[in-house]
Image: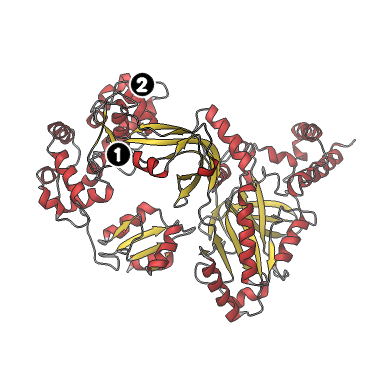
Amino acid sequence: MDKALRVKELHEILNKASEAYYVYDKPFMEDYEYDRLMNELIKIEEENPELKTLDSPTNRIGGEVLTKFEKVTHKVKMASLADAFSYDELRDFDKRVKEVAPNATYLCELKIDGLSVSLQYEDGILVLGATRGNGLVGENITHNVKTIKSVPLRLKNGGNIEVRGEIFMPKKSLIALNLEREENEEELFANCRNAAAGSVRQLDSKIAAKRNLDTFIYYYMDDSIKTQEEALIKMHDMGFKVNPLYKHCNTIEDVIRYIDSMGEKRPTLEYDIDGIVIKVNEIELHSLIGETVKYPKWAIAYKFPPEEVVTKLLSIDFQVGRTGVITPVANFKPVFVQGSLISKATLHNEDYILAKDIHINDDVIIRKAGDVIPEVVKPVIENRKGDTIPFKMIDVCPCCGSILERKDGEADWYCLNPNCSEKLINKLIHFASKPAYNIDSLGDKLCEQLFEAGFIKNISDIFNLKYNYSELIKLPGLGEKSIDHLIDAIEESKKNNLDQLIFGLGIRHCGAKVSKLLCKKFKNMDNLINAKYEDIIAIGDIGDAIAYEFVNYMSDPINLMEINTLKALGLNMEYDMGDIKENYFTNKKCVLTGTLSSMGRSDAKKLIESFGGNLSDSVSKKTDILILGENPGSKYDKAKSLGIYIMEEEEFLRRIKE
């Protein structure tokens, strides 16, 4: 047979097989036969490169390697959606819609927890896959999109079109990927979304091809389409994978009933969802209803409350922190919670466990506090059997064997041995970390390696590493370039502001915010050393316990010796206030929720502080402003309930420039 004809025939067979398996879930071909035909096509293309086309099924196995990602400007902005966290907010949304469009109905779709993608086709051939980016400009990820088997490389009916959807990683793919990474001693992916994002941003498409990514397409850019439901049906008929669990609802109460039903099904789904997207079904009404600068008014995303999952508590371990605090950690049967496969959670302290009556071998309820941190909510007492073991707190350090002590009025037990190796390692890790002294390239594993090799025992040893160059190079995994980079980073860090050093020292109760308050008040290290309890307690937001611990730390001869050594090594001991200019944010307490498209959190923090404002982590009655980024969390809900002013990113940028 003519090679060109055979290539065309193989394209048709393999594309139909992929569509049947990955789009319609109705395979008609055995894997063995599919692989045999694919290998035949690969061989023909290798021998006849001119026969390989853009829509060849062989593109799905990857092979293209980029040096960087190109920027892509979207023809139409890829807008994000406003979030609702309660049914009352959905009813308010309905009222706003019905005031303008009383006959509007709704289409509900699952909110897939992945990352948005735009797909463009010319003459029916996939020519561009792009990330959402900031909504206006994204990145070209075509080489990786082609490896996703549910994305058609050629459309059935040709044409120039653009569709949009979500790239995601199925739960079973994440499990398989993390097992492989664990065997290779690589860092595990925290959840399906992070794994998908990390996969599509691989420069080598062969890596993305192995990750078994998938898509659901939900937006068709075509003026002839009358309803969102019609768009989904048409895209499905064109060969795109469309989530079948959508529902057309006539009223907002129908929408709420649908959300309830999907909430029950959520744990059984093969992919992760974090909510439901509600759109006005009639597309002609969208322009009438309108949009804000950031969000369309004709759509909203309902976010599910924290998901609770039941699993079995297998054991309780004990960790030693940098201050010597002993933290019990629950090890439970791995379980998916809001997209993450988790198997551990802190149990805080002895009183926490006893108050909740948690036993080993209990069935326990797990959720993510603030949608981020895994926590054990409570045991399922009615499931308790005879094999459960009541909790008993240890009385010696699990690292050094020292007798533990618990201070009056406190819930924590402490290892008081100053030479406990786990305490020392964690103290070094904390000092070098980004939130503290921020020494680039001195990560957790390297800190541990240098400690175990005897190069660093105290913080000051870090700044003497340059004198051990010839010995460092003998350590496994360290070459000349990495050592040069490390030493340069250590030397550069000496210029850091004093508050970073104070935080890095690991003084009990003295976090980043307290360190900055102390340095603003006392200006330099000598003043801090000589600060009296009464002077410290007079500072707003600093209480008795903080003042006591700080004065106690600064009066310890061993700590003073270490500080004087750091001073002699050339570390900055002065606090630079910077030039504070009066602005809208001066003396305002701000909180940021979600992600800003224009800058990172640390940049926003620096800007606010440069105007004499403060950016904190939690919302309270004292908060003046909640700055709203994309995908906001529970802080948004709390701020609304407290009546705190909510500022969108556009206004934040305008206020900064004032």
The residue closer to the viewer here, 263 or 503, is 263
- Reading the image, the residue beneath label 2 is 473
Which mark is drawn over residue 33? Answer: none
Measured in 3D between alpha carbons, the distance from the residue under mark 2 to the one under mark 1, in whole angstroms, is 41 Å
**How crowded is the residue under tag 2: few (<14 C-alpha within 10 Å), some, or many (20+)?**
some
Q: Say which quadrant the C terminus sits in.
A: bottom left
Question: Does the rendering let one see residue 118?
Answer: no
580 sits to left or right of 82? left
Residue at image point 22% right, 56% down: 541
Residue at image point 61% right, 42% down: 171
**From this viewpoint, which residue is outermost toward the right?**
1
Q: Say which quadrant the N terminus sits in.
A: top right
**How crowded is the residue under tag 1: few (<14 C-alpha within 10 Å), some, or many (20+)?**
some
- Reading the image, the residue beneath label 1 is 412
Q: Amino acid at mark 1?
A: Asp
60 sits to left or right of 130? right
What is the x, y in percent for residue 387?
52, 31
Q: Is residue 584 above or below residue 550?
A: below
The residue closer to the viewer here, 122 or 501, is 501
What is the x, y in percent for residue 397?
31, 27
Residue at image point 56% right, 77% down: 95
